[in-house]
Amino acid sequence: MANKQVIIVGGGAAGMMAAIAARRQGAAVTILERNPRIGKKLLVTGNGRCNFTNIYADSACYYCQNPGFAAAAFARQDVPATIAFFEELGIAHKVEDLGKVFPMSDQASSVLDVLLYELNQCGVLVICDAQVTGITPKRQGFTLSTAAGSQYFADSVILAAGGKAMPSTGSDGNGFALAERLGHSVIEPFPGLVQLKLEGSFFKQIEGVKFVGTAELLSGRQSIAKDKGDILFGNYGVSGPPILQISRQAGQLLRNNQPASLKLTLFDMSQEAMDALLAARLAQAGAKTIEFSLVGLVNKRLIPVLLKQAGISDSRRPAAELSRREREKLSGILTDWRLPITGTKGWTSAQVTAGGVDTAEINPETLESRRVKGLYFAGEILDIDGQCGGFNLQWAWSSGCVAGQHAAL
Ligand SMILES: Cc1cc2nc3c(=O)[nH]c(=O)nc-3n(C[C@H](O)[C@H](O)[C@H](O)COP(=O)(O)OP(=O)(O)OC[C@H]3O[C@@H](n4cnc5c(N)ncnc54)[C@H](O)[C@@H]3O)c2cc1C
């Protein structure tokens, strides 16, 4: 029997992994990629260092409307298998804080280089500048058409066209339309791992100010999510790893028109302890103004904003004139600063897509469509997303491997 023809739509992390897996099973494999080169998004991952997996990643770490869906893919390609796969390709690895795994070279480009080398070495055909615009199931196999008017035939198709996050890399959501035209349902996508926009007219003033603290997402009085680390103010609101980690739930609250606010903790102590600290500091402030008495304790650019938030209008008054009530308001803000969330920064800055092709219509063991025989899915196009820290690429590798192996059979 002739080799099975497998066509992969999308040369991202999942598509490249699927291609290698299918080729290693003996299929004739072609990647159709709309960009002039494959792997564009991979180059920007991990701030250019590619956090390619996480030693704590397992199937329970993912959001999906169908919990447990990822388990079978992880049973086939788990984290040790991913690390071994890349070690074999030449990527020496190192584990950093919170289990994040990076190439020893600290270069995302080195991860792409070894994947390109392997694709070439094992004989995968890569066709770039080929945007797939139609996938038509035939009695036997599929025909795929591109924007340039070319047509291709495949026995099996793997749809690995990504989600909608960072559309400048090529994944702009058109894969969802392709899936829908093949009869699949798409759970409404929204940006995950994204910066948060906050209410307030002072953000331009504190743009670039960074602190190590806690970010907690609240809906009314209910705590929804919390994370700690480097938090950075932008002219729109906040970013930084803890913000990205809680952003999915924030986006979900906003979509459901539920109240969403952010509690920032600049000083990790009780309000009483903070108040005592401020009282002692003010007592020693001598002739200093209220504003100046905080220099050395709080970032200088934050001081006028925090004082204003505490309702302290004339901050040039002598420190001794700060009333107990004013001081208590200030210690309250330093330990519990509430800011209404007005939105997320949207698709252009998001790192992942929440939502996507409904996994209820997909066989978890093979990632084959339950609607169209011979059609497979891999990567972010599916309704699966993980936290920041290497989890999303791990899903791309696990799902790519499973889809590739089964599409080739
Ligand atoms: C800034 C940033 C940093 C990130 N950092 C990390 C990190 O450090 N660790 C981590 O785990 N995750 C990270 N992620 C997430 C991770 O990169 C993605 O989840 C992962 O790359 C998804 O892989 P994919 O192959 O499913 O999709 P993509 O990488 O988006 O690939 C899809 C490909 O399909 C192509 N395509 C789309 N439509 C068509 C079509 N119709 N025809 C032909 N080709 C098409 C696209 O051009 C693209 O090349 C980051 C994301 C961003 C945006």
Image (cartoon, rainbow, N blue to C red):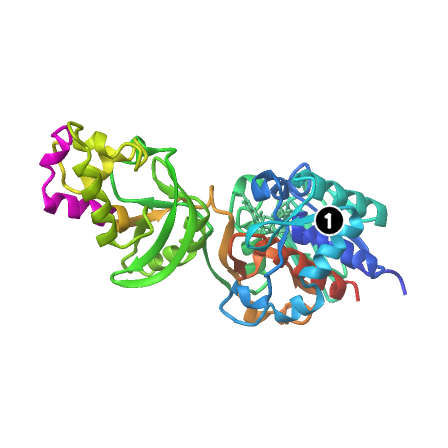
Left or right of residue 326, residue 207 in this image: right
Task: Give the residue displayed 90% in from the left and 65% down from the top.
Answer: 1
Left or right of residue 308, residue 28 in this image: right
Task: Give the residue displayed 19% in from the left and 35% down from the top.
Answer: 284
**Vertical placement of 368 versus 172: above or below?**
below
Between 341 and 12, the one nearer to me in the picture: 341
**Vertical placement of 262 versus 104: above or below?**
below
**Residue span colored magenta:** 315-333
The image shows residue 93 at horizontal and vertical percentages of 70, 48
Is residue 276 visible to the viewer in this orientation of the structure?
yes
Left or right of residue 322, residue 296 in this image: right
In which quadrant is the C terminus drawn? bottom right
Task: Give the residue displayed 59% in from the left and 67% down from the top.
Answer: 59
Is residue 329 within the magenta segment?
yes
Sort mark 1 into few (<14), some (14-19) or many (20+) by Cα contacts within 10 Å.
Answer: many
Is residue 27 visible to the viewer in this orientation of the structure?
no
Residue identified by numbered label 1: 31
**Quadrant assignment, res 68:** bottom right
Between 189 and 389, the one nearer to me in the picture: 389
Is residue 35 within the magenta segment?
no
Task: Give the residue displayed 64% in from the left and 68% down from the top.
Answer: 369
**Quadrant assignment, res 307:** top left
